Amino acid sequence: MITRMNHVSVFVLNQDSAYDFYVNKLGFKVHTDASMGPGMRWLTVCPPEQPELEIALMQVEEGMMFKDGAAAQMRDLISKGTFGFGVFQCKDLNATYEELRAKGVVFKKPPTREFYAYEALFVDDSGNWFSLGEIES
Amino acid sequence: MEAPFPKYYLYKRIVQAKLFMDAHFGEAIDLDNIADEAYFSKFHFVRLFKSIYGKTPHQYLIHVRIDKAKECLQKGLPVTETVFRIGFDSVSSFTGLFRKYTGTTPSAWQQQYRERQALLQREPLRFIPNCFAEQKGWTENSNFQEV
């Protein structure tokens, strides 16, 4: 029986820029940052209160994973905002929204009551969409 | 600009106080002054802050300082320098607080971090699930210490 997930990947256009966004703006913690050879880097971050979930920030570039022009197609899709990668949670959405906006995070939707949650929508520095929901107390 | 949600001005002031602490954690921060700056009575400020962040402003400031201390230790700064950087006067009081929050002393924590970093540099594939490493082709060239 599968019980939990502890690694997930988010494809980004640039790892340095993603580091700045996820660490300095969202406030995530760096879990592992390792050079894997020239131009290759294994970079994972965690939400501050969820150290067991490593989010691998995977830079899209030509190589084994993306061959024959697939990297360019993928980068194009990401930058067009094609992908929604998940839902983050916070204790107080209004405060988190205000703080992230003050740090330059771009929101596509302000805090809004939906059927399933009180949520806002933001994009990361590459163009990936995320929901930000308030934990029901 | 229209407020995006009710009582927006209250949130804005509390968030600004929090961001002030984030930026000035290494200085002597007077929480009474922060409450004044935010146009709140101290009681009202503490109550609102706690309702939003789950910690009192004082608890939050300690949390930030411990976090920043870890960053200094990760960069290899000595404990004495770290203490100074995060706004503490005394190594012993900082050490006690650090141990309370992390379960270990700053120097032991730093040593554990160094050992992990050394292992990460020597054998990075021990830290990377195979589904990622295989896709990247890293498992075919695992002699990373020579590149």
Image: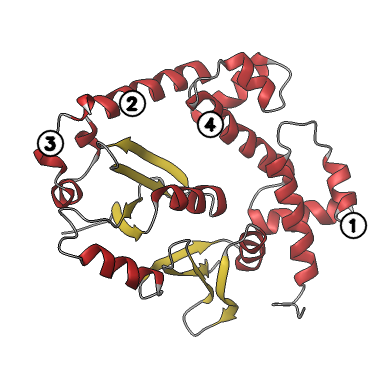
Q: Is residue B147 left or right of residue B96?
A: left
Circle 4 Cα neighbour tier, 10 Å, few/some/many (<14 / 14–19 / ≥20): some
Q: Residue furthest left?
A: B140
- Mark 4 residue type: Glu
From the viewer's perspective, tell me whether residue A106 is left or right of residue A2: right
Residue B25 found in image quarter: top right
Q: Chain of mark 4?
A: B
For the N terminus of chain B, the quadrant is bottom right
Residue identified by numbered label 4 = B71
Q: In the rendered image, which quarter is residue A107 located in?
A: bottom right
Q: Which residue is mark 2?
A: B116
Q: Which residue has dot 3 on it?
A: B141
Among numbered discs 4 and 2, the one appearing first in the sequence: 4
Q: Amino acid at mark 2?
A: Arg
Identify which residue, B49 or A99, lies in the foreground.
Answer: A99
Asked whether disc 4 touches disc 2, contact meaning CB atoms under 8 Å apart, the reply is no
Residue extending farthest bottom: A115
Q: What is the CA distance from the residue labelled 4 to the residue labelled 1?
A: 33 Å
Q: Is residue A72 above or below residue A108?
A: above
Question: Which percent across, then down, holds residue B20?
Answer: 75, 46
SS assignment at label 2: helix
Q: Residues within 10 Å of mark 3 (few under 14, many from 20)?
A: few
The chain letter for the residue carrying disc 1 is B
Q: How much space separates mark 3 and mark 1, taking CA atoms? A: 60 Å
Residue at screen point 40% across, 25% down: B113
Amino acid at pointer 1: Tyr
Label 2: how many Cα within 10 Å (few below 14, some 14–19, many 20+): few
- CB-based contact (under 8 Å), mark 4 and mark 1: no
